[in-house]
């Protein structure tokens, strides 16, 4: 099971490390290994959230997620995305941007760093909306009840999460503009860019999330109707063909997963520049990490880990909220990637331990009730 799920990740790791050694010797080998670990640590919460969505898909779409999705994640977000950002921010063609990435690495790094406020605003708003919609939803299982109960009541107010996200964006943009004025106005124009990028992130979440939610609801309705029709068809011996809508629902959930992965990858791509500005090593290291995140997602689904450890999804969403805040803060202030990674790991670890304690308490309560039943029955 382990080899089947992580086989491709192991293979890509071996190929990536060998390619790095041939490309730049043992130094490059070490850099790629560090980048892979960085990506895994920063994106573990991504795997948990992805698993919550992926478990609703059938085996075919899970396979698509591991094949086409990996190509988008590794080559799209870890290799093409930084080049596109440079091309847009520096107003140059893609060929020039690639040439710059390969032959003038310091200038390339500077251009990506300059584009960071817009990237952070887009990704931060998208992730913040995911967290807010989760925390404002009234759910049967609650982890931190003293926080989640009152917030679930507030969540009954329509569009509350959108209002809060916009307030956060306005405050961030305003303070960024004020900070720029106080320091000579070098980044005043970027305050407007931050505002536009943040709104774009919000719109992207609402469109993609709304479409996936719509088709998911339609799929559930169709499945209920199909179940009733199949019971009736069983008497006549006729079978109804598979629902076409399942493909649409799965497609939009897949699209949502890809946008989600893109938002998670922003901090990894930017953080990688603290280790190297070589785009080849960056793509190799982050690509290896992205493979493990995807394999881990599928592993969590197939093992039923989210069902066994019910607070894991809560911990992952709290980590998403923390990452969203960190991204918004990094628009003005630098935060070490170690801090970013540790916050997510600590929150998920805490939710895992809480889940273990809950399972033990339920098991003990079950044993206690069995003993009482035996005594009362005279066994």
Image (cartoon, rainbow, N blue to C red):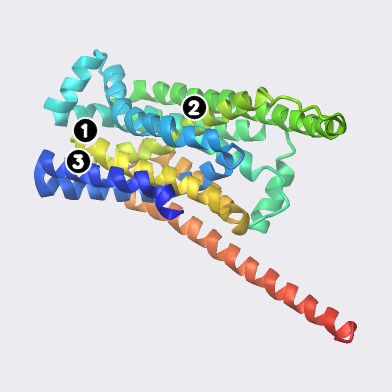
Residue 305 visible, this angle: yes
Residue under label 3, please give it: 276
Q: Residue furthest left?
A: 25
**Which is more foreground, mark 3 or mark 2?**
3
Crowdedness near tag 2: few (<14), some (14–19) or many (≥20) residues, C-alpha within 10 Å? many
> Picture coordinates of residue 185 (x, y %)?
31, 25
Is 20 displayed left or right of 68 in the figure? left
**Mark 1 and mark 3 in contact (Cβ < 8 Å)?**
no
Report the residue at 58% width, 64% height from top. 354
Numbered label attached to residue 279? 1
According to the picture, the residue beneath numbered tag 2 turns out to be 201
**N-terminal-most mark, 2 or 1:** 2
Residue 39, relative to residue 256: is it above or below?
Answer: below
Quadrant for residue 21, please give it: top left
Query: For the image shown, how many numbered marks are present on the structure?
Result: 3
User: Dots 2 and 1: beta carbons under 8 Å?
Assistant: no
Front residue (pair 293, 241): 241
For the residues labelled 2 and 1, the Cα–Cα distance comes to 25 Å
Dot 1 crowding, Cα within 10 Å, few <14, some 14–19, many 20+: many
Q: Circle 3: is it few (<14), some (14-19), or many (20+) Cα within 10 Å?
A: some
Mark 3 or mark 2, which has the lower sequence index?
2
Q: Residues at badges 3 and 2 in contact (C-beta under 8 Å)? A: no
Question: What is the spatial separation of the Cα atoms under label 3 and label 1, in whole angstroms?
Answer: 8 Å
Measured as percent of width and height from the top left, residue 153 is found at 74, 45
Kindly state the secondary structure of the residue where label 3 is placed. loop
């Amino acid at each position: 099971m382990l080899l089947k799920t992580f086989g491709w990740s192991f293979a890509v790791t071996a190929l990536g490390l060998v390619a790095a050694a041939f490309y730049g010797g043992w130094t490059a080998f070490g850099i790629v290994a560090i980048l892979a670990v960085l990506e895994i640590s920063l994106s573990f919460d991504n795997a948990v959230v992805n698993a919550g969505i992926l478990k609703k898909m059938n085996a075919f779409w899970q396979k698509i997620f591991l094949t086409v999705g990996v190509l988008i994640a590794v080559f799209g977000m870890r290799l093409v995305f930084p080049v596109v950002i440079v091309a847009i921010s520096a107003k140059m063609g893609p060929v020039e941007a690639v040439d710059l990435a390969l032959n003038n690495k310091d200038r390339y790094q500077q251009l990506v760093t300059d584009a960071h406020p817009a990237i952070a605003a887009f990704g931060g708003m998208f992730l913040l909306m995911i967290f807010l919609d989760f925390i404002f939803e009234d759910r049967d299982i609650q982890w931190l009840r003293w926080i989640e109960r009152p917030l679930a009541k507030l969540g009954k107010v329509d569009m509350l999460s959108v209002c809060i996200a916009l307030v956060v964006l306005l405050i961030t943009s305003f303070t960024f503009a004020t900070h720029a004025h106080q320091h000579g106005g070098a980044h005043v124009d970027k305050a407007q860019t931050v505002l536009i990028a943040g709104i774009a992130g919000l719109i992207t979440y609402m469109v993609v999330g709304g479409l996936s939610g719509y088709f998911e609801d339609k799929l559930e309705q169709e499945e209920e109707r199909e179940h009733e029709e199949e019971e009736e068809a069983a008497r006549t011996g006729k079978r109804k063909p598979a629902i076409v809508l399942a493909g649409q629902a799965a497609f939009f959930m897949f699209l949502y997963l890809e946008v989600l992965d893109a938002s998670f990858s922003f901090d990894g791509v930017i953080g990688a520049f603290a280790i190297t500005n070589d785009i080849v090593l960056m793509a190799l290291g982050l690509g290896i990490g992205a493979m493990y995140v995807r394999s881990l997602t599928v592993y969590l689904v197939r093992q039923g880990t989210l069902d066994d450890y019910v607070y894991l999804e809560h911990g992952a969403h709290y980590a998403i909220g923390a990452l969203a805040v960190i991204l918004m803060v990094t628009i003005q202030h630098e935060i070490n990637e170690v801090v970013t990674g540790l916050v997510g790991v600590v929150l998920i670890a805490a939710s895992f331990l809480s889940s273990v304690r809950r399972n033990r308490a339920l098991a003990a309560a079950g044993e206690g009730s069995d003993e009482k039943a035996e005594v009362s029955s005279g066994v």
